[in-house]
Image (cartoon, rainbow, N blue to C red):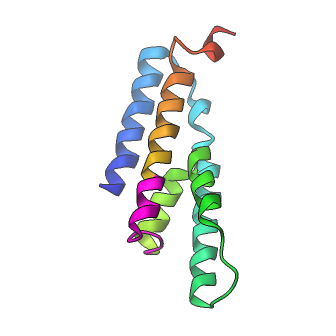
Amino acid sequence: MPYLSILLFGAVFAGAVLAWHVPLWAGALYLPASVVCFVVYARDKAAARAAQRRTPERTLLLLGLLCGWPGAVLAQQWLRHKSSKRPFQMAFWATVLCNVAAFVYLVSPLSFVRML
């Protein structure tokens, strides 16, 4: 399921490019945001192992919401970090849905951004 979410978003993005002529750079935010999010998850995992100061969960969720969720998905799977905490997972997937919904709206012909 987690990897499927990234593939599905890729399909949504490709559909938006084809149907609404969305420029490819519109998806460019996701790559650097995902790298940053992955690094923050990795540092938090290392801090957890070393019993050091942790990154607040709300920060992890905010980074995912701000286009970094694909990196968070990969970090959760590859690093096994935050992948079994049910309350966090529920909040995380809610932020993914919010991000994807916002993306679809902002690139759709109905968006105020597209009307500018």
- Depth check, front residue: 27 or 88: 88
Residue extending farthest to the bottom is 50
Q: What quarter of the picture does the C terminus occupy?
A: top right
Residue at 45%, 67% (x, y): give it.
76
In the image, residue 17 above or below residue 45? above
Q: Is residue 8 magenta?
A: no
Taking 59 as reference, is 11 above or below it?
A: above
Outermost residue to the left: 1
Q: Quadrant of the N terminus?
A: bottom left
Q: Nearer the viewer, residue 65 or 4?
A: 65
Give percent across and percent down for residue 44: 61, 75
Front-most of 27 and 114?
114
Please state the horizontal and vertical placement of residue 74, each as a whole percent of the image. 46, 62
Task: Count the numbered circles shown.
Answer: 0
Is 82 drawn above or below residue 24 in the view shown?
below
- Give the residues in magenta: 80-92
Q: Percent from the top left, x then y, of residue 102?
A: 53, 31
Residue 45 figure quarter: bottom right
Residue 51 placement, left or right of 104: right
Residue 84's x, y, as percent?
Answer: 38, 71
Does 2 appear above or below 9? below
Image side of residue 109 versus residue 112, left or right: left
Name, please, the residue furthest toward the front. Answer: 87
**Is 32 displayed left or right of 24 in the figure?**
right
* Residue in the picture at 51% in, 23% down: 105
What residue do we see at 52% from left, 57% from top?
71
Residue at the spot x=47%, y=62% of the render?
Answer: 88
- Residue positioned most to the top: 115
- Locate residue 68 relative to residue 5 in the image: left or right: right
